Image (spheres, rainbow, N blue to C red):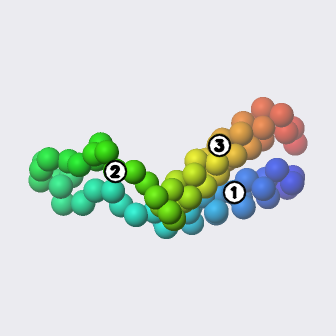
Amino acid sequence: MHFTDVLLIIVSCLLITIIVLQQSKEDATQAFTGEKSELFANKKERGAELWINRITAVLSIIFFVLALIIAFFIHT
């Protein structure tokens, strides 16, 4: 197991954890009943929600880059 594999596992666990911490932006019942969605309402993120979204974006990019590196450049 290479260092990049371990790093990918750590980033994956962090990404799962940070996604679980995010608040739902929509009520699940609206998805099944067809009610009007407020998904694209102009609500500005602030405080912890803003930081959680930024961390999620950064971890997602790191995960993607690590996966590409492992797939194309690491030979076992």
Q: Quadrant of the C terminus?
A: top right
Q: Is residue 32 visible?
A: yes
Instruction: Calculate the distance from the C-alpha at mark 3 to the C-alpha at mark 1.
Output: 10 Å
- The mark found on residue 22 in the picture is none
Type of residue at label 3?
Ile
Mark 2 vs 3, N-terminal side: 2
- The mark found on residue 43 in the picture is 2
Q: Which residue is mark 3?
A: 61
Instruction: Calculate the distance from the C-alpha at mark 2 to the C-alpha at mark 1.
Output: 29 Å
Give the residue displayed 20% in from the left and 48% down from the top: 37
Give the residue displayed 18% in from the left and 60% down from the top: 29
Instruction: Please tell me which residue lies in front, 22 or 73.
Output: 22
> Is label 3 in a helix, a strand or a loop?
helix
Type of residue at label 2?
Lys
List x then y, in percent, for residue 64: 66, 41
- The mark found on residue 11 in the picture is 1
Q: Residues within 10 Å of mark 2 (few under 14, many from 20)?
A: few
Picture layout, residue 14 above or below residue 4:
below
Kindly indicate whether the residue at mark 1 contacts the one at mark 2 (C-beta within 8 angstroms). no
Mark 2 vs 1, N-terminal side: 1
Q: Quadrant of the N terminus?
A: bottom right
List x then y, in percent, for residue 71: 74, 37
Instruction: Calculate the distance from the C-alpha at mark 2 to the C-alpha at mark 3.
Output: 24 Å
- Camera-side mark, 2 or 3: 2
> Is label 2 in a helix, a strand or a loop?
loop
List x then y, in percent, for residue 21: 49, 67
